[in-house]
Image (spheres, rainbow, N blue to C red):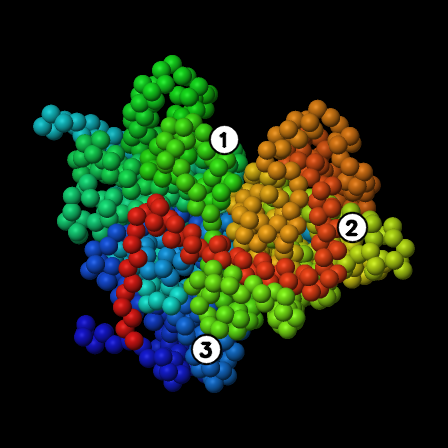
């Protein structure tokens, strides 16, 4: 059979059709009488999956033969988005499939729409992991993604009476043709229990006996590279009961108790925690983290052992990247296995661990930093807590030798936070256990070394790096914006830009070309039309396609300042109302202002922001006087597939966080690539975007990082009426006068800036924001100038391809070489 398997699926239209038809008959067991579009999607996906599996098996076989070093990317979240189009584009078969399907009476685009979006992440961090997988595959790096196969992804957001309602997202409802269940890849995971010490030939050995044992099973998700046969694996773990463990209860005749414990095991990977940036501290979450960590480390060790190398060679063959501190226990787990089971000395084990791990920080918000209570941790993972204390002890001894009697240093560097409620600081553990630590944009990385991790930086400056985020042009231009892709192909004369975005810079002169400008505007208009219908169907609002599409889509957070955006919308509304009807069109550019994003279910202020947007929307959109000069829409259930419609259609996008608080942002990069102008603060990657595209092609405003603290202090000591300008005061008064209704919620919302010290300095930045908005209006009146800037934004966005980011990780952190498998064709 192995000889027979060596041939590959042919690419002809007929071959594609016959493979689809085969799946209709033999995989789906369908007849012509109840065949739906959904079945069509399933059959097509299975036929594409066959091809992925060919490439996927060959890839790892090849890696293995070449004895390469692997990177393991560990993340509790992946927002990979829909797979079908992405796979076809990366396999370069979209054209053939389109034709094959058309022939059979199906429009491929409507087939795409059948796919549910796997939403196994919250926001930026999860989507970054997905872009990284695409780039790792495309650049032929030997890589593995590891994560959890949650049965419920991030909730589906519905808007009822203007409020967010969360609906469970059981995304596996219709099966998942993309995953391969590995019935034979299972690992035992232990929890709780006790530890005993044994002395064997004069050496002390620790044995941890878990009292709850479950199983993690592998589900493989092939990730195809673009323009290469390489296809890598995203391996997601699912928790299952361990049959061995139940045996006892069954024998004791307690049937129901046995079933209960089985359900408890399955529950562990059932739901993604929908918080981003507030740490929950729940035991179930820690169980999730440990399950990922333990199964992944066991899998990596099993693979390494087949090589029959010594442990000290581990870092030569393995790099482990921690996507934030969520999987940080991996450091401890590898230490535990090396010392307790493999019998290495502590120092030997530490060398192995330290040289293979690296940690990426994604936020400096204090409420997001993970700190596990020692009781909780010590109860669930007693041996791990012991090892953490050990690591800390040895680390602090070094510190006190270097800085005798510096108690402040000792207490800030310690892995343990003392107090009535003792906790383990996962960031400190991650830094101490890693040879490299990075932030996700230049400004953010710099703030890590000067603020959050200052003392660590002074200890080992060489450990700290920057890796500015990036996004994959395959999904975010090629898939999401086919019109722009075709235009870029014509400009460049090939589709080489998909793999080398930097070449777009060579074509900047086209920005002045009226013919190109026209085509550019046409593409944007077609994308706006698509969003127009999307909005009409889902929100029942009729937008003016000629109005400026102004969009802010991201998780709802006070620091991202959606509140400032909506307060400005109200400002605009009041100004329009004050202006005599005959002068309105002269003074105001028609705008459609759209918001989208989920609020964490327990984050009341964020939910009130959504309520305010919807209240304003209702008032403004129904005001005859205003007409199409101003429309406000809340786009429900923002996710990856919706982003693919929203981003290419937008003309202005808002990235307006308080300076210093947005680590990077990644949608800003997607918007720029798609020829959208940014209104934003000098925060996160906006700073580098300004460097690349030129400040004159953006609308930059607001306080810089260095000014924020001073502004906060100033405001702390004064009444809000003294530092809110008249424009903001009037807006707040309008809300409080019940102009939009919902007075209770909205007053409470305003109090977060009026009486709570306005931590996010919205009051201080508002005037400068209004001025920037005025510049937007002025420029939009000049279609040609606007379009020129739009073109330049896109052509100068090359730095923000995740290919650049991944190359830097590979070269500067992982020490990893590409390994391209020969293309069989
Ligand atoms: C423990 C709760 C929790 C969950 C998720 C805390 C923090 C997080 C993430 C770190 C939040 C997140 O997604 N951060 C975003 O990461 C992106 C990718 O680097 C950045 O572009 C965003 O600026 C950052 O907010």
Residue at 77% across, 48% down: 570
Check disc 1 and report the residue beneath it.
451
Asked whether mark 1 lies closer than 8 Å to ligand 1, one says no
Q: In the rendered image, is residue 427 in sight?
A: yes
**Which structural element holds mark 2?**
helix
Quarter containing the C terminus? bottom left
- Percent of width and height locating residue 628: 78, 62
Residue at 65% across, 38% down: 703
Distance of label 2 from label 1 (alpha carbons): 38 Å
Residue at 21% across, 49% down: 304
- Asked if labels 1 and 2 touch by Cβ distance under 8 angstroms, the answer is no
Of 15 and 433, the residue lying toward us: 433
- Percent of width and height locating residue 376: 40, 31
Distance of label 3 from label 2 (alpha carbons): 46 Å
Asked whether mark 2 lies closer than 8 Å to ligand 1, one says no
Of 235 and 816, the residue lying toward us: 816
Check disc 2 and report the residue beneath it.
572
Mark 3 or 1, nearer chain start: 3
Mark 3 or 2, nearer chain start: 3
Check disc 3 and report the residue beneath it.
95
- Percent of width and height locating residue 99: 47, 82
Residue at 49% across, 43% down: 442
Circle 3 crowding by C-alpha within 10 Å: few under 14, some 14–19, many from 20: few
């Amino acid at each position: 059979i192995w000889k027979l398997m060596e041939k590959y699926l042919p690419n002809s239209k007929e071959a594609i059709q016959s493979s689809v038809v085969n799946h209709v008959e033999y995989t789906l067991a369908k007849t012509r009488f109840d065949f739906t579009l959904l079945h069509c999607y399933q059959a097509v996906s299975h036929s594409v999956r066959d091809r992925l599996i060919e490439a996927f098996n060959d890839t790892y076989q090849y890696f293995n033969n070449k004895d390469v070093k692997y990177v393991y990317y560990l993340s509790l979240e992946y927002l990979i988005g829909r797979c079908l189009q992405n796979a076809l584009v990366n396999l370069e078969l979209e054209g053939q499939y389109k034709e094959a399907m058309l022939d059979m009476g199906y429009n491929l685009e409507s087939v795409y729409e059948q796919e549910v979006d796997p939403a196994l992440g919250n926001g930026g961090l999860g989507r970054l992991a997905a872009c990284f997988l695409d780039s790792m595959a495309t650049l032929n790096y030997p890589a593995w993604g590891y994560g959890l196969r949650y049965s419920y992804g991030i909730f589906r957001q519905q808007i009822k009476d203007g409020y967010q309602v969360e609906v469970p997202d059981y995304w596996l409802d219709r099966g998942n043709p993309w995953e391969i269940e590995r019935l034979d890849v299972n690992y035992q995971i232990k929890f709780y229990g006790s530890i005993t010490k044994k002395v064997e030939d004069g050496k002390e050995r620790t044995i941890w006996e878990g009292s709850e044992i479950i199983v993690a099973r592998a589900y493989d998700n092939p990730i195809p590279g673009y323009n290469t046969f390489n296809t890598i694996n995203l391996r997601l773990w699912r928790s299952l009961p361990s049959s061995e463990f139940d045996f006892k209860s069954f024998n004791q005749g307690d049937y129901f108790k046995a079933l209960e414990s089985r359900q408890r095991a399955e529950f562990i990977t059932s739901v993604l925690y929908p918080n981003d940036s507030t740490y929950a501290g729940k035991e179930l979450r820690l169980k999730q983290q440990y399950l990922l960590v333990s199964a992944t480390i066991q899998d990596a060790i099993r693979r390494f052992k087949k090589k029959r190398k010594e442990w000290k060679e581990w870092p030569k063959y393995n790099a482990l990247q921690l996507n934030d501190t969520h999987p940080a226990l991996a450091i401890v787990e590898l230490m535990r296995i090396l010392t307790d089971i493999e019998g290495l000395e502590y120092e030997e084990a530490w060398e192995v661990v330290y040289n293979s791990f690296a940690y990426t920080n994604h936020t400096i918000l204090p409420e997001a930093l993970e700190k596990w209570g020692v009781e909780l941790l010590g109860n669930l993972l007693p041996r791990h807590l012991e090892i953490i204390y050990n690591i800390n002890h040895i680390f602090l001894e070094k510190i006190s030798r270097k800085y005798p009697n510096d108690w402040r240093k000792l207490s800030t560097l310690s892995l343990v936070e003392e107090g009535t409620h003792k906790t383990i600081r996962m960031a400190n553990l991650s830094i101490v256990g890693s040879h490299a630590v990075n932030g996700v944009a230049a400004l953010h990385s710099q703030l890590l070394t000067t603020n959050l991790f200052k003392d660590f930086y002074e200890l080992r400056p060489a450990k700290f790096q920057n890796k500015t985020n990036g996004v994959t042009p395959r999904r975010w231009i090629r898939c999401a914006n086919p019109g722009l892709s075709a235009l870029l192909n014509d400009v460049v004369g090939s589709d080489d830009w998909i793999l080398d975005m930097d070449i777009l810079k060579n074509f900047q002169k086209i920005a002045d070309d009226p013919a190109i400008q026209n085509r550019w505007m046409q593409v944007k208009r077609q994308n706006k039309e698509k969003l127009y219908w999307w909005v009409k169907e889902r929100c029942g609002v009729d937008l003016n396609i000629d109005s400026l599409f102004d969009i802010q889509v991201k998780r709802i957070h006070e620091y991202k300042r959606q509140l400032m955006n909506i307060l400005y919308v109200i400002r605009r509304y009041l100004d329009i109302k004050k202006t005599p009807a005959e002068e309105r069109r002269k003074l105001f550019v028609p705008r459609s202002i759209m918001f989208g994003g989920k609020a964490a279910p327990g984050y009341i202020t964020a939910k009130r922001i959504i309520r305010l947007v919807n209240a304003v929307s209702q008032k403004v959109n129904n005001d005859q006087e205003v007409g199409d000069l101003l429309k406000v829409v809340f786009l429900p259930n923002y996710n990856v597939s919706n982003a693919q419609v929203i981003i290419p259609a937008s003309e202005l996008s808002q990235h307006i966080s308080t300076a210093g608080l947005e680590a990077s942002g990644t949608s800003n990069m997607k918007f720029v690539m798609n020829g959208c102008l940014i209104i934003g603060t000098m925060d996160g990657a906006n700073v580098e975007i300004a460097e690349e595209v030129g400040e004159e092609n953006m609308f930059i405003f607001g306080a810089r990082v260095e000014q924020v603290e001073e502004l906060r202090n100033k405001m702390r000591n004064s009444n809000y009426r003294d530092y809110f300008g008249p424009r903001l005061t009037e807006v707040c008064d309008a809300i409080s006068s019940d102009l939009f209704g919902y007075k209770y919620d909205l007053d409470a919302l305003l109090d977060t800036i009026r009486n709570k010290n306005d931590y996010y300095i919205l009051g201080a930045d508002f005037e400068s924001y209004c001025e920037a908005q005025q510049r937007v209006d002025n420029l939009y009146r000049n279609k040609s100038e606007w379009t020129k800037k739009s073109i330049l934004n896109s052509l100068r966005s090359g730095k923000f391809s995740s290919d650049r980011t991944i190359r830097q990780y590979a070269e500067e952190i992982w020490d990893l070489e590409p390994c391209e498998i020969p293309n069989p064709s």
